[in-house]
Image (cartoon, rainbow, N blue to C red):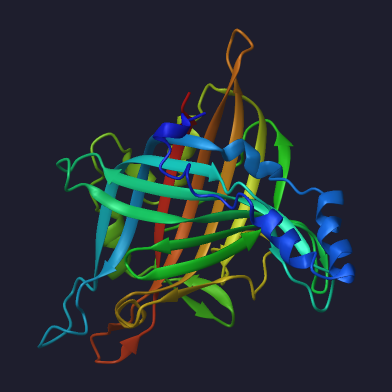
Amino acid sequence: MALEQNNPLANLNLSGLNKLEAKIENKGPQSKFKASAFEAAPVNLGVLKSLIGTWVGPGFNLIEVPNMNQAKPGPPPTDKFKIILNSTAETFTFSNIGGDIINRGNAQSDIAFQGLHYLQQVDDVNLPSGQNGIHLETGLFLNLPSGSDPLVQPSIARLGSIPHGDSLLAQGTFFTVPGPPVFEVADPTPFFIIDGKRVNDVSETYLSQLKNAVPPPGIPADVIMNPNILLKNAIEGQNIIETVVILLDANPIDGVANTGVTAPVGGITNIPFVNVNANANSLSAIFWIETVQNLDKTTFFQLQYTQTVILDFPVFAPDGSVVEIKWPHISVATLRLQA
């Protein structure tokens, strides 16, 4: 566990909120019963409890960004996008909110749940200190209960804010499996949606930039076409005895979303500049909380994740037409819980 005095989120809590709720509710005899109902049905963090603390470790970031294809005078440039690759060092801090969160019911009775604050900071290890920050995100993870209206199963929600001007709400399921995780391919190829399905653009214009990209030092070349290879390599030889899996999606789309997810789930809202120039409109992520056993039978926690954000920035084709293409932005990391 991270020491509380070193945790930048430690002082953020809802302490006393349920007491305030009870004080307000107790003004009338009918509402007194409602306030005490939450005391009789305690809520908890569930699988999120394992995340509390500070996680540190390496990762990889791949993003395809626009090349001002629509802004430059003259014919469209040959390179319609740029690829940015980062070898990363990451710190992911989770802290208990410190109180029950109560949502008032109308179609059904009130619900209560708990959650975590989080702060994610990602640096490029190959850039000078002070100039190497590439991602900052803060928000909440919530352990949501089942409900009758709407009829839903227990789930995890992630609410995040990013300084580029994006706010997201992702939601999904969770489960526990024996042994290590299974990694699917994380495909960075740009694609179209045709008849509701993902269809990759395999033209040499796009694939050549991906296949010819030079990875950062220490990153294998094959990781570019499937960043999840880095996650697989990181656990090679480890004895992972149990894995908690958390699936999260926001505005899911075919070929990226987690298996079985259908829209509408969550969403992303951006400032107008982002909407026009590189619209972030979908997110799919998997978090694996792994229990790793050492040779002496002691254990430690490890957190891995893969995340794909889809950016929409149309480009001009050589014939002058505008081509609507979706561009995957993929991040992966393997983190250890700090003592």
Q: Is residue 167 visible?
A: yes
Residue positioned most to the top: 296
- Of residue 201 and residue 3, the one placed in the foreground of this image is 3
Q: Nearer the viewer, residue 48 or 283?
A: 48
Coordinates of residue 69 in the picture (x, y in percent): 21, 80
Q: Residue 130 versus residue 79: which sits nearer the camera? A: 130
Quadrant in the rendering for residue 320: bottom left
Q: Residue at x 48, y 61 (%)?
A: 160
- Total label count? 0
Farthest left residue? 74
- Can residue 186 be seen here? The reply is no
Q: Is residue 310 above or below residue 124?
A: below
- Residue at 54%, 63% in the rendered image: 256
Q: Is residue 112 left or right of residue 329?
A: right
Residue beneath the point at 80% across and 48% down: 42
Residue lying furthest front in this view? 27
Q: Position of residue 1 (x, y in %)?
A: 52, 28
* x, y percent for residue 65: 28, 67
Q: Residue at x 36, y 45 (%)?
A: 60
Horizontal arrangement in the rendering, residue 58 relative to residue 260 (left or right): left
Give the image location of residue 101, x and y in percent: 67, 58
Q: Nearer the viewer, residue 54 or 56?
A: 54
Left or right placement of residue 31 versus residue 190 in this view? right
Q: Quadrant of residue 147?
A: bottom right
Vertical placement of 263 versus 216: above or below? below
